[in-house]
Image: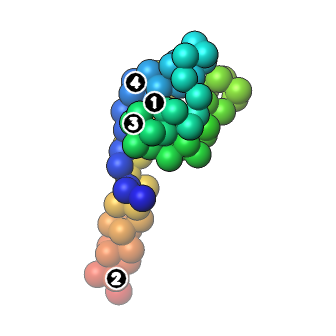
Amino acid sequence: MSNNKYTNEFKKKIVDEYISGSESFYSLERKYNIPNSSIKNWYYNFYKKGIDISTLKENRGRKKEKAIKNNAEVYSN
């Protein structure tokens, strides 16, 4: 499994294909080579939970921020 980052617009495009009824989660998985569990999560977040796609950050960078904080603590001691 790859560790790809997808834009919110791309996620919405895929979820919209599912919503339109033209594709299933499984067929979208094969079409885009993305795990169907990811597509299901996007569907759940965008449509079931009602998260507005325009408010989501593209790349949150949590791991990078945590690494920077840990390095700062090491060098401050």
Work out which quarter of the rendered image holds the C terminus and state it. bottom left
Q: At label 3, which amino acid type do we have?
A: Tyr
Quickly name the residue at label 4: 9
> Neighbour class for label 3 at 10 Å: few (<14), some, many (≥20)?
few
60 relative to 68, above or below: above
- 77 and 18: which one is in front? 18
Task: Report which quarter residue 25 is drawn in.
Answer: top right
| Mark 2 or 1, closer to the camera | 1
> Neighbour class for label 2 at 10 Å: few (<14), some, many (≥20)?
few
Q: At label 1, which amino acid type do we have?
A: Lys
| Mark 4 or 2, closer to the camera | 4
| Mark 2 or 3, closer to the camera | 3
Question: In the displayed structure, does residue 29 sit left or right of residue 49?
Answer: left
Quickly name the residue at label 2: 74
- The image position of residue 50, as x and y in percent, is 66, 23
Residue in view at x 45 percent, y 30 percent: 11
> Neighbour class for label 1 at 10 Å: few (<14), some, many (≥20)?
some
Q: Check the image and name the residue furthest to the left.
A: 75
Quickly name the residue at label 1: 11
Q: At label 2, which amino acid type do we have?
A: Val
- 28 and 75: which one is in front? 28
Structural distance between the alpha carbons of marks 3 and 1: 11 Å
47 relative to 74, above or below: above
Q: Secondary structure at mark 2?
A: helix
Structural distance between the alpha carbons of marks 2 and 3: 42 Å
Marks 1 and 3: in contact by CB < 8 Å? no
Task: Point out the tag, 4 or 2, that comes first from the N-terminus.
Answer: 4
Which numbered disc covers residue 32? 3
Task: Point out the tag, 2 or 1, that comes first from the N-terminus.
Answer: 1
| Mark 3 or 1, closer to the camera | 3
Res. 53 in view: no
Marks 1 and 2: in contact by CB < 8 Å? no
